[in-house]
Amino acid sequence: MAQPSTLEGKVAWITGGGSGIGRAAGIELARAGAHVVLSGRSVETLKKAQKEVTAETIPLDVSDR
């Protein structure tokens, strides 16, 4: 049986990470050992997500250069 993969030492940066699929992905990536960074437009949504995911948060709008 294959060993579960680990993401120790890797960084996972998720845009749209404050809710939905992005937040769920952040939770799973953190469980796998990745250092997670969540980005999104809403500071409030990111704060809520940060309570569920051990992650850094960076508010940003990827459509704004």
Image: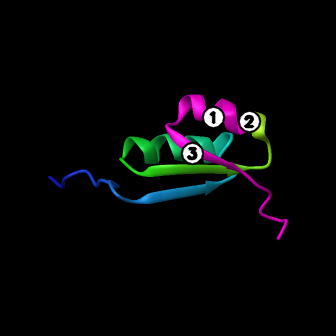
User: Is residue 53 left or right of 60 when viewed as pictured?
Assistant: left
Q: Residue placed farthest to the left in the image?
A: 1
Residue 22, compared with residue 13, is above or below; it is: above
Residue occupied by mark 3: 56
Residue 3, compared with residue 43, is above or below; it is: below
**Type of amino acid at the residue the image marks with label 1:** Ala
Disc 3 to disc 2, C-alpha distance: 13 Å
Percent across and percent down for residue 20 are 67, 41
State which mark lies toward you, 3 or 2.
3
Q: Earlier in the sequence, mark 3 or mark 2?
A: 2
Percent across and percent down for residue 54 are 49, 37
Residue occupied by mark 1: 49
Disc 3 to disc 1, C-alpha distance: 10 Å
**Type of amino acid at the residue the image marks with label 2:** Thr
State which mark lies toward you, 3 or 1.
3
Residue 36, compared with residue 46, is above or below; it is: below
Using the image, tell me which numbered label, if any, was put on residue 45. 2
Label 2: state its secondary structure.
Answer: helix
Q: Which residues are the magenta region?
A: 45-65
User: Is residue 27 left or right of 63 when viewed as pictured?
Assistant: left
